[in-house]
Image (cartoon, grey):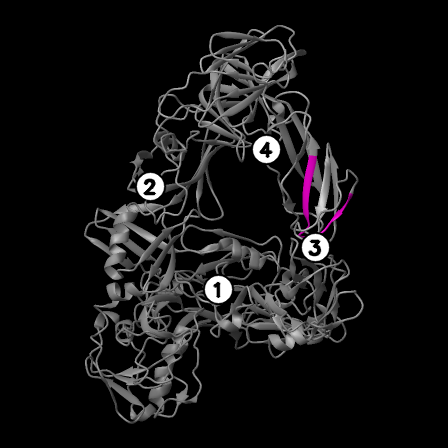
Amino acid sequence: MTRKPTRFSFLVFLVLSAAAPAWAAFTDNGDGTVTDSVTGLMWDKCTWGQTNNADCSGGSVVNWNTWAQALARAATANGSAYKGHGDWRLPNIKELESLLKIDATSSPTIDTTAFPNTPSSSSYFWSSTPSFTQPNSAWIIYFDNYVMMSSVSGKINYVDAFVRLVRGGQPSGAFDSQDGTAPVYQGATLGAGNTVATLTFDEALANNLADLAALKAAVTFAADGTSFTAPAAGDTVALSGSTLTVTFATPLTGGANQLKVAANSLKDASDNVVASVTATGSPAYQSVAINGSNTVATLTFTGTPLNNLADLAALKAAITLAADGTNYAALAAGDAVALSGSTLTVTFATPLVGTANQLKIAANSLKNGMGTLLAGATTVPLAAYDIIPPVYTGAALNAGMTVLTATLSFDEPLVNNLADLAALKAAITFAADGTTFNALAGGDTVALSGSTLVVTFAAPLTGSTNKLNISANSLKDAIGNVLASAVTTAALDAADSTPSTFSFTAATGAALNSVIESAAITVTGINIAGAISIGGGQYAVSTNSGATWGAYTASAGTVNFNDQVKVKLTSSASYSTVVTAMLTIGGVSGAFVSVTQAASSGSGSSTPTVINVTGGETTLTGTTPVSPAPGSTLVVAAGASVSGVPITLAAPVAGTVTAPVTIKVGGNTLTVTPVGATAIVTLKTLTLNGVPTPVLAVSSGTVTVSAAPGQPLLTVGNSGVVVSAGTGGGTVVFDGSGVATLSVTSGYVVLPANAFAAIPLTKDGKLYAGEIAQLDVNGKVTQVRLGSPAGDGGAVGDPLKPADFIKAVVPNLNGKVARISATRMFADVLAAAVDQDVTAQGQNSDGVLHFAIPGGSVNALPVGSITVDTSRPDGVTLTGTGNAEVVKSGVVTTIVPAIGDFTRFVRQLAKLDKNAILSVLEDGTVHVRLNNVTYVLRPAWTVKPADGGQAVSSDEQGNLVYQDGAGNRQALFPAFADLPQLIAAFQPLDVGATVAANGDGSYRAKLLGKSYVLTPDFNLSVTPADQAAKSWWLDAGGKVFIKNSDGNAQGFGVK
């Protein structure tokens, strides 16, 4: 069933206020009718199917899934003088709209005093008004969800809707019931000794040509089904009611006879012309349906298929089945076939299983009323319904020291088969020893979520032998297949011996050759004993929060949760020297470091412990630490062993420009400047081009490094990745705090082939000015993005600071990108990458980039990081969320459709609700909180010119249309608020399930090899309490709902 999405409640005020009358009192006539004092219309008090004129509490409402059925209710009512009247009719759209109660605060949105027991869920009602722009549609009203839907076009053959009849009044002529549909061909029969062919339509026919001779000339005949010629001279045609008869002077023979009636030859009484060719044709297979037990397949054909064989036994023999879709075999002895109307049914003695089943009907087994044979074999796919109960796939405990939850997974969504969750909990038992099962503890809880059963324990689990058991018949799937056997998990290991990270405070200025003791650390994050060991010192353990301590030891041992540990070591006998003791618990290590005091004058030391360079040029010949003043020059003597020499760069003085320190190594010259705070760099000896070469490395802090063309700048990480300056020289900023980054601020630098963690993000290894490489611990590049080291919004790629309602990270586009062009603005580059006819019109304060296109414009909001991946070809790629990735010369920019002026839009919302809230998210969805209801929108890509002031209206497809008052008109489509959650809900049914946006408010889904179109509701709703444990469900009206990760629910239609 397909339904149009719901709509903002404020749209009803904007769109329907003119249509709906001021809310008037209704007069109950006491005979099951109600009179509207404003319109003068007399309404049926009850929805069709209800009885009891007092309160419509008897009988039951009826859903009519075709417009014809709905229209026919009036004829039925008038034939029986329903409620004392014989002039009932289906109301037109304006009349039906007049019943909408705009100020209603609950569903249904109708005066329930005047119209009691109106359905409050899926409350769709048919009107008599056809949609002339969509001839196969009629208009309906949705009296549901706090008046969030007005006149909505529903497919005539696919909408289930109710009927409320009306009589009298002054109906609006433009909306009266009109027949806008041409006669529809139903089928043909051949009788009277094969001389009379009768073609039947769904309504009375009229000749649209000059006379019967002209109509005869419009009819052609093909005895072979292919070569059509005019009827013979003695043949005649006639019209009678809904039939066209062709009488042949000579009886027909053979099984390929076909008739054609030319387009525009026939019409109905309302002058609706049959605009297409009518051909009798052979029976054509249309669809198949399988019953819930997988035992009956019903095949539907065009027209009425007839048996062309001797009897049903012969027809059964002409039908074969392939369970694997390939190897066909005769139907089983207990199987049966039958023909009825337009259907052929095959009943299987043994239910079908699987999705590969295929039925084949042999050629010439069926024919139509004209005797025309179904000449080719017909193959029909038969995917069996799920009659298999959920299958247990495994269990897992939550990670971490405190194990409180066990999650049991199955292959499909679960439903509780017992009375309630209390009963389900009683059906689950637990064995800590894996053998002795007992009831769950009083504080334990159970919950169902999608395809998982979650057991939450009040007390943490320990040990490795834990098991859970679920009694038989406790669980079922959404179809009702009960898991008839008990489920026992494998042993669940709750043991965790890996502690939380820990660290010791370094002891600096330590006395020489002294025993140094650390402060105590507390062991956390384990629930069993963890191994402990030490290198370079000793450790002691306290098991009573430090009240008493065990003896210091260097031997391995174990510790438990909440134990305290301290470390001691002996400091160096030399000045300014580091000694480290490394403590390891459960694989996690922490270092205790001591640094001896610096030598004082007169200490007797003949070797300096630190070389303080106050300026000028100093030559380094050994491994003594160096502390150079800004502007100093350090020269590494040829052949000097300087590997590991720490060079401490003093923190810059605020408000001043810090002169760089120059380092000359083997003919290469570097300049190094600390950024923000003290930094320490060292020299590492690496083999470059076969020659041992000292290369700069950053030990701590952030530095700016510059080098001449072709020279090595620095080495990063622990795998020897060396960054070199490009042909014009290069400057980088290396930040080693947190996630290490390498920012190029001038020229370009070159990375070796082994510099990338995965694929080379730049094929030539080059990073240009304005690009930032993110590094892992090995110095490997994991991402390249545009931006500046400060990230203050001045460079392309830096995050802007738009209004608070924009929750996305919005990158700056104003500027040039060195990788692409030194002269063209990046926004212009993006426009040209989209299309040669597109021009950029600038990025506004909200970050929205405006593109001019022929006949309109595009509003695009860039989101996330602008990245570099030169393996990507130039062009535009639409993502599954409906966003676009624009690639030019390897620079990848993600853009989402946007409203051109969000600030103006916010002001419009505030007029409707002063507490309105707007949130623009990085996935491109726009969330509007209005009158305590959240709506999820997605702007259309294209914007059309429009006159007039600000307004929000709706189009015929049920979408919102925003007019900004500045000459722009833009559609706003419904969107899924949590697309990843929707896909996750499908994946237990099909791990390969996909859902992708179509860009028009609908989404295409692929599930179990089939394609569907999903249309989300605009509004989110509160998840019903009885559905809280589910990831998706069907409501009483058959609509599908998904529970989002934030707990809200969103409905959607499926086609």
Secondary structure beneath label 4: loop
**Of the two numbered discs 4 and 2 in the rendering, the one whose residue sits closer to the viewer:** 4
Q: Which residue is under mark 1?
A: 259
Q: Which residue is under mark 2?
A: 848
Secondary structure beneath label 3: loop
In the foreground, 233 or 781:
781
Judge the density around disc 1: few (<14), some (14-19), many (≥20) Cα neighbours within 10 Å.
Answer: many
Estimate the x, y position of residue 967 in percent, counting from the top left: 22, 46
Residue at (33%, 35%) from the top-left corner?
A: 838
Q: Which residue is under mark 4?
A: 776
The kind of residue tagged 4 is Asp
Q: Earlier in the sequence, mark 3 or mark 1?
A: 1
Q: Is residue 213 left or right of residue 1030?
A: left
Determine which quarter of the picture holds residue 800: top left
Q: CA distance from mark 2 to mark 3?
A: 52 Å
Q: Earlier in the sequence, mark 4 or mark 3?
A: 3
Q: Is label 4 in contact with label 2 (beta carbons under 8 Å)?
A: no
Per the rendered image, the range of residues in magenta is: 557-568
Determine which quarter of the picture holds residue 588: top right
Q: Earlier in the sequence, mark 4 or mark 2?
A: 4
Estimate the x, y position of residue 58 in percent, counting from the top left: 42, 90
